[in-house]
Image: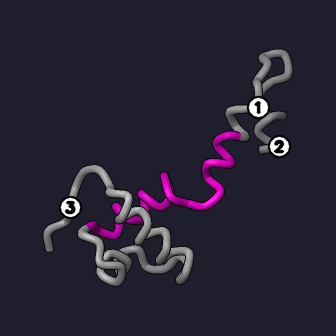
């Protein structure tokens, strides 16, 4: 099977997101065949971890808004994230 490499299209992102939200996390090596993506399971797993997870942007914004002061140390801030 030829696996596509490179950038993910918005359609591929949406298909992966829809599948995982509907069926949950399962065997990543089976996901591309079920969803019809020209990718391998590792690529799908990494894409889910890195990009289309719901709530990920909210967490990134929260981390960016938190200012770290050297006098307070970073461990106190990280415990609240």
- Which is nearer the eye, 58 or 76? 58
Predominant SS along the magenta part: helix
Give the residue furthest to the left. 2
The residue most toward the front is 11
Which residue bears the numbered disc 2? 80
Q: CA distance from mark 1 to mark 3?
A: 38 Å
Between the residue at mark 3 and the residue at mark 2, the CA separation in whole angstroms equals: 39 Å
- The stretch of residues the image draws in magenta is 39-61
In the rendered structure, are the residues bearing label 2 and label 1 in contact, judged by CB atoms less than 8 Å apart?
Answer: yes
Viewed as shown, does residue 43 lie left or right of 79?
left
* Residue under numbered circle 1: 66
Residue 10, position as x, y percentages in the image: 38, 58
Quadrant of residue 42 in the image? bottom left
Nearer-N-terminus badge (3/2): 3
Q: Secondary structure at mark 2?
A: loop
Badge 3, how many Cα within 10 Å: few under 14, some, many 20+? few
* Residue 18 in the figure: left or right of residue 7: right
């Amino acid at each position: 099977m030829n696996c596509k490499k490179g950038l993910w299209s918005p359609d591929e992102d949406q298909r992966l997101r829809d599948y995982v939200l509907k069926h949950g996390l399962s065997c990543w090596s089976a996901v591309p065949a079920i969803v019809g993506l020209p990718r391998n399971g590792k690529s799908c797993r990494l894409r889910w971890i890195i990009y289309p997870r719901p709530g990920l942007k909210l967490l990134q914004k929260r981390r960016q808004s938190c200012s770290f002061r050297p006098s307070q140390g970073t461990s106190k801030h990280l415990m609240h994230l």
